[in-house]
Image (cartoon, rainbow, N blue to C red):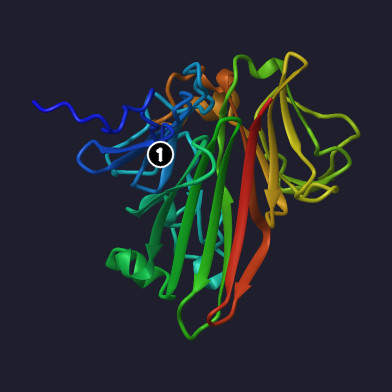
Amino acid sequence: MVDRPNKPSALAATPGLQPQAQVTISHGNSRVSASLPSGESIEILLYGATVLSWKDASGDEKLWLSEGAKLDGTKAVRGGIPLVFPVFGTAPDHEATSKLPQHGFARNSRWEFLGKSTSESSSNSVKLDFGLSSENLDEAARQLWPYKFGLLYSVTLDRESLKTALVITNEGDVPFEFQTLLHTYFRIKDISSVQIAGLEDSPYVDKVDAAKAKTQSSDPVAFSGETDRVYTPAKGPSHPVVISEGGAAKFSIVRDNLDDVVVWNPWIDKAAGMGDFEPKDGWKNMVCAEAGAVSSWQKLEKGDAFEGAQTIYLK
């Protein structure tokens, strides 16, 4: 080998790319997972585009998922973050959605995974996009709700937060009305020590008490029995709704264009009556604080779009 006097010297260290978020598709192409170099992770089931898991860097799970949840596409998932569209609950008096199953069809349909995107300036976030359109629905759902629409759902994992955003587009010639909700199940240790702030002095509908219209006191929401309330927070979507446990803040929810917050815990009897709610005392370890637009109907004309989002910050 000839020694060249002017050969380039080796670099002391070869510059490498920043570690990037890892995205994997598993379980027979039915789940998408993502993890950040720092350790945070999420897992989404394509059935319903349901977020099943959100863990911090230490592996601590932030979402409650029933041990009896059906993850095989036979029914909507009990836990995580199911998507409600185009109706909240049932609406027998609203002709367009009167025949739809509870909470509509978005959580019962298989979505497409549209891909991931990451920030060029940071390896600390990853966005996963999912799509559902009228063409993707089964024939039964199209018969029940014959409008042409497109849904784009984006799930963005950051080191300190999780953002879920939904864009709803009317792709047909006929206007339609809808409701939508991000049905987030938060994992907590003991519901008796949980309080939710940010709803003080706000009007709400008490679904446990014959759907009576009430007003929250100036105190945070606390739990001592079955709770099912639709709040319209007086301070608006940008004011944080904070879930605390034992006096320490755990989650802070900021909404964008979603005026309502549903607060739900089934307590003893309701949990016992749900076949997919396991363990039966799991109500002690979960609370739902659900950002949505459900107290009235949203209307989209031809070509119009609606966008709503929530960002959940870890405290």
Instruction: Describe the element under mark 1 as helix, strand or loop.
Output: loop
Q: Amino acid at mark 1?
A: Val
User: At 42% from the left edge and 50% from the top edge, which residue is drawn?
Assistant: 107
> Vertically, is 197 above or below 246?
below
Q: Nearer the viewer, residue 237 or 178?
A: 237
Q: Is residue 203 left or right of residue 218?
A: left
User: At 48% from the left edge and 86% from the top edge, which residue is drawn?
Assistant: 173
> Vertically, is 193 above or below 208?
above
**Quadrant including the C terminus:** top right
| Mark 1 surroundings: few (<14), some (14-19) or many (≥20) residues within 10 A | many
Q: Position of residue 16 (x, y in %)?
A: 38, 32
Q: Position of residue 255 (x, y in %)?
A: 69, 48
Does residue 89 appear in this view? Answer: no
Does residue 50 appear in this view? Answer: yes
User: At 37% from the left edge and 69% from the top edge, which residue is drawn?
Assistant: 134
Residue farthest toward the front in the current orientation of the protein: 5
Res 177 → quadrant: bottom right
